[in-house]
Amino acid sequence: MKTLRKTYWYVSSYLEKHGKLLFVAILGSTVFLGVLLFFLPKLFSLKPRKYIGIIGQYTLTSLPLEIQNKMSRGLTTSNEDGEIIPDLVSRWSVENDGKQFRFLLKENLEWADGTAVTSASVLSSFRDTESLAQNNELLYSLKEPFAPFPSVMIRPIFLAGKEYPVGFGPYSVRKVTKIDDLLKTLELESVDTILVYRFYSTEEQAKMAYKEGKIDQLSHLTNADAFEQWKQTTIHPEIRFDRYVAIFFNLQDPRFEKPVRQALNYALSKPPSQVRAVSPYHPNHWSFNPAVKKYEKDQEKAIELLIHNIPAQPLSLELTTSTHFSDLADAMKQEWETFGARAYQACITLEEIKNKEMCSNVKIELRVKISNFPDLASYQILLIGQQIPLDPDQYTMWHSTQTTNFTHYHSPKVDKLLEDGRKTIDQLERKTIYAEVQQYLAEDSPAIFLQHPIEYSIARTSFRVPGKE
């Protein structure tokens, strides 16, 4: 008992002399520990990191869609058939004969930084379009009917006035490093993962980074042959049905009359059916027409077309393409030149052709020019890939008034169909319109549609990205 009282006196005496100091020490330790617990996870995150390579040069305002889609969403989205459906909106309506589109936002939306969403904060501006935000509605008024407008609203939306992009998640920008304005690395963070994107100017640089262990995943490769023997790497090929590879003719060249284009089309071997492209439309889209002319290889038909429509000038031609398609271009050169030699022999033996000197004009001499940045304003034949738009409207590609119609294709019938297609709201009517567009494009052959390209992704076997398991 005496020992207990003695201990009590000692403690009471100590607290009387040093109580304030002890209180401050405890309070300070508590505050320090709280601050440490708050900032430590940010400085030394225990979340798994995934290192992903991106090929190309980008800025924060020109991020590839695959990254934008990690950080945000659009007012609309699309399903597997290419139909446009609501995303951040609950519905939309088309008014004033297709000149107005009214979108109703979903309730209780928040930006990734916790800011409440208002209709004004998601309002986008478009040329020749009046926009109005009121309550939870967005109203867009156009000068002319434009049926593809809902597909335009698929693009991810970001909050204006922020240093870094702020969208609707699930990922937010964590850290950025740049060289001048170009991105070197970009870190995105979700509740359970950090994605570290590293940017490389060329495919070869990106492949080298993978070999050196700087990244764990790399997509959009033209080939993955160098990694076939890597035991810890998985290679995933993907047929890109949203793209196509085609041979485009410059129709300002008088040699490329319709029968000559058709002959050159029939003279070429076509790729296997699983990757075959027969039109510039997605084969799984609601607007696709599978009944168009296919132009399977038919040398006899090709020869008949060519020798009965001998061009006024020799077929000494130049094909421009990029390094990606150089092997394909070489194969085309061999096929066309062999075909030209056969056509010449048929021409000189055909009695009904009296002027045999003209037969030399069906011989084909093809020069292959490699350029990774082909000049669309100056070429004879162009072998390149093209992106297929989400909406079947291809007015800018094929209408005769458009500067982006680099083939200079001119068809009054197709012009009228394209004009009607972008003004028609009813999907069944649009399906009929674009089926006809595809029939005319196949028949007229301003381009030879070849294939949907195959792209390759590589990843280390332990690598997993949320949503890709």
Image (cartoon, rainbow, N blue to C red):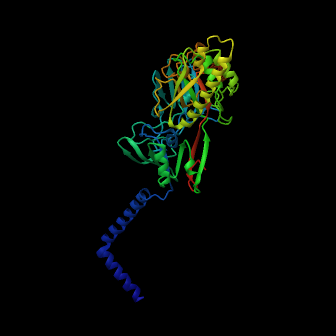
Count of marks placed on residues: 0
Which of 229 and 47 lies nearest the eye of the viewer?
229
Location of the N terminus by quadrant is bottom left
Q: Give residue 80's quadrant in the image.
A: top right
Q: Is residue 283 visible?
A: yes
Q: Is residue 438 visible?
A: no
Residue at the outermost left position: 17
242 shown above or below 16: above
Which of 436 and 10 lies nearest the eye of the viewer?
436
Query: x%, y% of residue 271?
Result: 65, 34
The answer to whether 57 appears left or right of 396 in the picture is left
Which of 99 and 277 lies nearest the eye of the viewer?
277
Q: Give residue 32's quadrant in the image.
A: bottom left
135 shown above or below 72: above
The answer to whether 24 appears left or right of 41 in the picture is left
Query: x%, y% of residue 124?
Result: 47, 30
Residue under the image location 57 percent in, 47 percent down: 225
356 shown above or below 23: above
Query: x%, y% of residue 350?
Result: 68, 15
190 shown above or below 105: below
Which of 297 and 63 lies nearest the eye of the viewer?
297
Query: x%, y% of residue 189?
Result: 48, 50
Residue at the outermost bottom position: 2
